Image: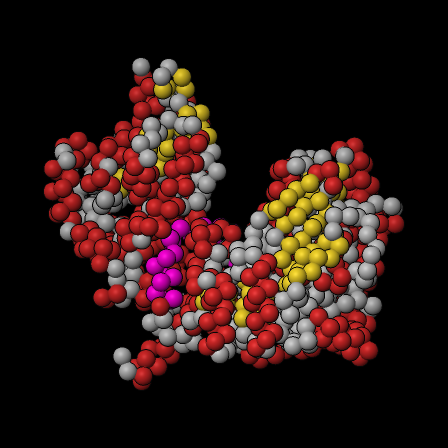
Amino acid sequence: MQAPVRAALRSIVGDANYRDTDGDLVPYSRDATPLFSARPDAVVFPADTAEVAAVLELATRHTVPVVPRGAGSNLCAATVALRGGIVLALTRLDHVLEIAPPELLARVQPGVTSKALADAAARENLLWAPDPGSRTVATIGGTVATNAGGLRGLKYGVTRDYVLGLEAVLPTGEIIRTGGRLHKDVAGYDLTRLLTGSEGTLAVITEATLALRPAPRTSGTGVAYFSDLATAGRAVSAIISDGVLPATLEFLDRSCIRAVEEFAGLGLRADAGALLLFGDDGEPDSVAQVMARMADACSAQGALEVSTAGHIAEAEALLAARRCALPALSRLGSLTILEDATVPRPRIAEMVDRIDRIAEGHDLTIATFGHAGDGNLHPTCIIESHEDTDSVARAERAFGEIFSAALELGGTITGEHGVGAAKFPYLSAQLGPDQVSLLRRVKAAFDPAGILNPGKLGS
Amino acid sequence: MNDTSRKAARITGRVFDPDLLSRCISCGFCLPACPTYAATGDEASSPRGRINLMRALQDGDLDPYDPTLTEQASACLGCRACEPVCPAGVEYGQLLEQWRDHQWKGRRQPPVARALMLVTRLREVFRVLGGLRRLPADVLGKVRRPRPGKPAGAATPEASLMLGCFEQVLFPEVSRAARQLVPELAVPTGQGCCGALHAHNGDTATGERLAHRLGEDLPGTIVTTSGGCAAHLASVLGRNRVREISELLAAGGTTAVPQEPQPPLSKNELGELKVDGRRARVTLQDSCHLRNGLGVWKEPRALLDRIADHVELPSAAGCCGAAGTYSLLRPRESRRILDAKVREIEAAGVDYVVAVNPGCLRQLQTGLRRSRSRVKAVHIAELLAQAVEASRN
């Protein structure tokens, strides 16, 4: 990057909000994705939308790549500066601008964390529904840009279902506002939805207007053990066919149960092939009824054991099994590759079976947990050491096969993590050449100089 | 340094224990827990960012004398608030010690820290200083000095009280209170430093050596009134050798593994603390290493609940800015953290803010004095000793 560009960046954001020494750039060389790293040329921390616009306009003029970044907690290398350039860190834009209970909405800056928004909403007795596993750290900008999911997708949907409007800066510097405060608004192409999940390749989100819901008054949690995942899958089908739309339906496979038990000693059944965590929220009477129906459905399908929590402490103990899944697995080795292939709900057991066989074929440890309610699986590969290049190569081949298997079963290469740089090579297999070419034309319409997050999505 | 030696230094690659360094999965869950990240918003001053810097140092991807490396090794409070929230179990405190061991080698060690460490080596200085403040007469008078490794009395004592090198000079009343609370504790004289100061300031070898020596000098379970010393001693001597005083009192018994469920302070022994005729209002400031390193935080609260109205400080689990030598090495940053803490304490409307570590106690006293607050900072042992007195009146 040339000296005049550096000087111009400094004058836009101020010296205190500009970094470009080797040591300052190292921490911005990667995000939460293993195996991806690239050093940018500079990091800037703009204070407001005007500074974002000035940086982008400058970058387009000089054709310098710009990678927007929130907390860098994504798992698809969406914020790795593959081609260097400027990392645009939006963490200083961290204000909840408005919570409007009568309109059931919030207006926030992109650097607000998901948890901060949820807390602000909760103070007004409202719910911010999307709850990705990284909610304490992930920013709303990143949550919208990757269309993040979470643990209650079946009942509450994902981020896109809650984005009403956006303020965004185009790579050429213009500031646009899409959508607004309305739940009904059909004027124009739905650019709000296009930008949601665009992974920082089309525009930089500088403000989001988000839908909230009334906070549920209570919640319930239960756990069921099954001899195998196929039986657990039948129980899930039975629950949903029974007309129940539960807030929680999470599962752990045999390897996960074993790892969690070794790590946390929660007293999980060692002989079970699958653990299903089920729960719902809402009015106390209705939750009690739904919990009983789900427990019955599990028993009817031949669960080894079913129990429901009588109070919050018991519920927390049950939820601990699911929360411990990643910590337990990550302790088995130094490299943890967490993926999110997703299949139609009735095919979960079949998919996990395919994953197990692929892992065996490549002599790898892959344990699977995930969201049984929406078919979103998290096959997690554990490798002893980063330096074991042979295992890493085998893992890459195995995940290629896992993505193909997901597509064969009518699923997707990514349910909620995003494509980023990590799954870019597999994208065309899912979308086909015509759609990929349309993506490129969309990208060019937004970003004629190709400066925004190059090497991803429509690039 | 010429290019060849710089390159050699870059590829030695064993600053950190590779097993510790490879634990981090870079998820970023530590970011919201980190006080320095909260202050700057810069990934470089977050635990994950610092671990990426450590990795670059280890792998030779960064000049070992890069200014950001030096700055971040010292800007970290070392509070270890990142450890309890880490899903992968990264032992950040250990990594930080190894980092400083490398970064602050020799002349690069901050002069203030070096001076303090020299002082701690002169055991006699402490005894003299202690003597000037009438410490031995009050606290140690009835205990004969044991030979190292030998019990103080006829029978092997189950537990010994650690006096703490700075505490016995600055706050002799704390050990006095501890002895009142647990009279059966042996109190060997001539105790040295536990080495926490050294381990946190770039000299892990001395830090370990001093801990071992203290372990030989103090028979049985080592009971300490300092959360920071407790965590360091536990990391060197093993968790079972060490009990922080509130942990000991809340769990019961002076043995390492409590024999009976009965706490040493039974209900009728702990009276109610009164201020102006009403029940006292108190709040607790956690010791970072006690909470994040040893997982002890419920115990002091349980004790305070028994003697007063205990109010939880919103940031109780967050560092007060003392952070060992941090308040001396980086006074400006330390003060910024302390000022916010003092405002919170003032807003809590309490009579006492309670510390479980002498460094925090000194920091809180300084902050409260500066803002002319009416709130008093005290050590938990002192307050409990007062409550025992109260039960007898």
Decide if residue A139 is on the left or right side of residue B182.
right
Q: Residue at x 43, y 36 (%)?
A: B344
Residue B85 among those drawn in magenta: yes
Please provide the residue range marked out in magenta: B68-88
Quadrant hosting residue A252: bottom right
Q: Is residue B191 above or below residue B208?
A: above
In this rendering, does residue A155 appear at all? Answer: yes
Q: Quadrant of the C terminus of chain B?
A: top left
- Viewer-proximal residue, B70 or B207? B70
Residue at (75, 54) in percent of width and height: A179
Depicted A303 relative to depicted A60: above or below? above
In this rendering, position of residue B219 left or right of residue A51? left
The residue at the point 44 percent across, 48 percent down is B292
The quarter in which the N terminus of chain B is drawn is bottom left
**Is residue A363 visible in this depiction of the protein?**
no
Where residue A414 appears, x then y in whole percent? 72, 66
State the residue lying farthest toward the bottom.
B4
Residue A375: give x, y in percent of width and height: 77, 59
Residue A82, horizontal then vertical, whole percent: 58, 75
Whether residue B269 appears in magenta in the rendering, the answer is no
Depicted A395 relative to depicted A54: above or below: below
